[in-house]
Amino acid sequence: MPRSLAPLVCAVAAALSAGCGGADSTVSLTFSGSAVGPEGEVVSRQLARFAEQHPGVDVSLRVTPDAADQRHQLYVQWLNAHAPEPDVLQLDVIWTAEFAGAGWIRPLEGGDTDFVAAAWQAAHWRGTLFALPWFVDVGLLYWRTDLLESAPGSLARLRDDAARLAASGPARFGLVWQGARYEGLVTVFLEHLTAFGGRIVDAGGQVVVDEPAAIRALTFMRDALGAGGFVPASVLAWQEEQTRFAFQNGEAVFMRNWPYAWALLQDRAQSAVAGRFAVAPFPAGENGRFTAALGGAELAVSRWSRHPDLAEALARFLTAPEQMLERARLAAQFPARRSLYDDPALADALPIPLEQVRDALDAAVARPVTPVYTELSEILQVELHRALSGQATPEAALHRAASDMRALLARSGLADEGARP
Amino acid sequence: MPLLVAPALAFILAGSLLPIAATAWEALHGHDLRLPWLGRPFIGLDNFVEAAGDSRFRAAFVHTVAFAAVTVPVELGLGLGLALIMQTATRGRSAVRLAALLPWAVPTVVAALVVRFMFDGQTGVVTAMFRSLGLIGPAFDWLVHPLGAWVPIGVADVWKTAPFVAILLLAGLQTIDPALHEAASIDGAGPGRRFLTITMPLLTPTLVVAAAFRALDALRLFDVVYVITAGGPGTATEPLSLYAFIALMQRLRFGYGSALSVTVFLLTFGFALVWVRTLGRSLVGERA
């Protein structure tokens, strides 16, 4: 029970702090988000600059856990308790619908539309803009330029190259991806799924993850695993870093990972493959198209903020081109603004060659947009993991996932509306 | 006089009865933090009905009970062995006791992490050992095998808690009057006979208590699993407490999560009640 008392405690604490600082002439805003390492540095610098431009405004940074689950849990507790702080929240792209649906974040004016399409779409809920895309992340295929002439153009070639090179010896593993039972597995699955022409939800919002194309995609992933395949079974316990270690030690021909790995893999002090790899989009299979799962963050204004206009101004300031470029330079994160990709300054700012990621960015797809996304995803994670670890056939696992997902939408009062693809 | 126990009563009330009652009350509501538009309606036992039909819950229940049924006897056996060694060690007695107790002093999360590394599919020492003996194939990975994943969990739990059992049993052993053993050996009883007819009967009350402690802990299994497999692969190693945690803290379904927590409480409480009523009473009865 102590856990469900936490919102109450938050509410009391918030009420007390409101009592303390109410009549002051300076206005204080609180920003909450990632603040570790270079991200923390760049965000502190930008918050200070905003305060300089707005005399009488004091902006503070509230550090929240870097682990997405923990930050999510904290936000939900604060917002449930109607805490007036933080004013501006950094949201993971998959949370926006949940927070908008719950009425925890304010609708925003949508005049400025210069954002990457999938991120722009994920920032909306029921046709209304609720957040400003801040930075984006896309799944990429890292490949070894010393072992291959070119990136594989199809999933079949990826499989053949991976299997051949893993069998003949230059690397122990053909391909490594994030297979632990967590959100990363859903993004890997989404890329395979789209490669086979499948979808999690259809245009009408209904769950279709048990269609034949989805079953083919999951069967491909399962067959790739283990003794006869080209992906080590251990990936089912791996997240991003374990796959990076395998690739950076020269043990894998291919790796599916996010852009963050680029700079680390180029670091000769720790990487055995520095200068011997490149990135490309994860390729398409039969009847499908290549794609990249979209990750990243957006900024939203809390419904309970006492200074909503100022808070929105801060969110717009942080998502302005200059701040995004600075963030790209200092924290190596991809800006969410489309127009910046034509700006040579961005190519200079980012360590990763832009021409290698542009295709993936253009093809990026959002995960289903629904207030119950986290639970929807958890159902899928469990069933995918069951199928991949041989506890169920891909068909049985996906049928079960789909029926559980439909039951969840029905229980949440979202059966008709479904989830937006 | 009643006033003097009032602080203690108030403490029990505030510290355990109220939270338990509040959880039980929450369990009777439909309450999902992420879906505030659904409100917090009173829904009676619907959460428990949902749990009964939830295959993941039923599997977690089986995992929890099976884990306790397997690990507790192993821990009692190993603990007894350790206790006998500690009891009979003549030289370096304190060194032996210290060595035996060390695992108990290691934080559970640290112990679990160490075991996780030892059983890592690529770099673990245990995995390498089994592989070189030809017992497992080159592609085998403990953590992604639905049954194999229980092995590191069981090893971590037994390694960590057998010393606890040992120290309880050692205390029990030391209450046995040495004169009984002397008299029996004068009558010609060998060590095996003395163990079965003197040590075991006199140690039984302590064994019952140790078993109760361990079983209650095992039925609340959480941390070792959380660190080693997080319930995977799929949900093959997910115990009740972990599922309740996921429902509460990840899905933020406070009503359903509370209902799951209440079942964990009822399971342990029911076990404790039956255990004390049957074994406890028969032991007390024998003595009287």
Image (cartoon, helix red, strand yellow):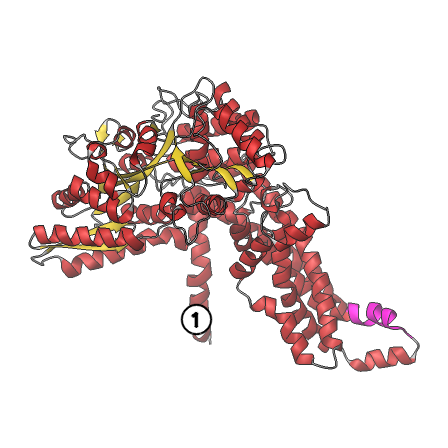
Q: Nearer the viewer, residue A307 or B214?
A: A307
Q: Nearer the viewer, residue B124 or B210?
A: B124
Asked which quadrant contains residue B200, the reply is bottom right
Examine the rendered structure and indicate whether residue B241 appears above or below residue A385.
below
Residue A384 drawn in magenta:
no
Q: Say which chain tag 1 marks.
A: B
Q: Position of residue B125 (x, y in %)?
A: 62, 55
Q: Quadrant of the C terminus of chain A?
A: top left
The residue carrying mark 1 is B6
Examine the rendered structure and indicate whether residue B232 appears above or below residue B282.
above
Res B55 visible:
yes
**Which residue is at 20% across, 52% downward?**
A30
Instruction: Classify residue A45 as left or right of residue B225.
Output: left
Q: Nearer the viewer, residue A273 or A292?
A: A273
Q: Position of residue A34 (x, y in %)?
A: 30, 50
Res A303 visible:
no
**Which residue is at 28% across, 42% downward?**
A350
| Residue type at the position of mark 1 | Ala
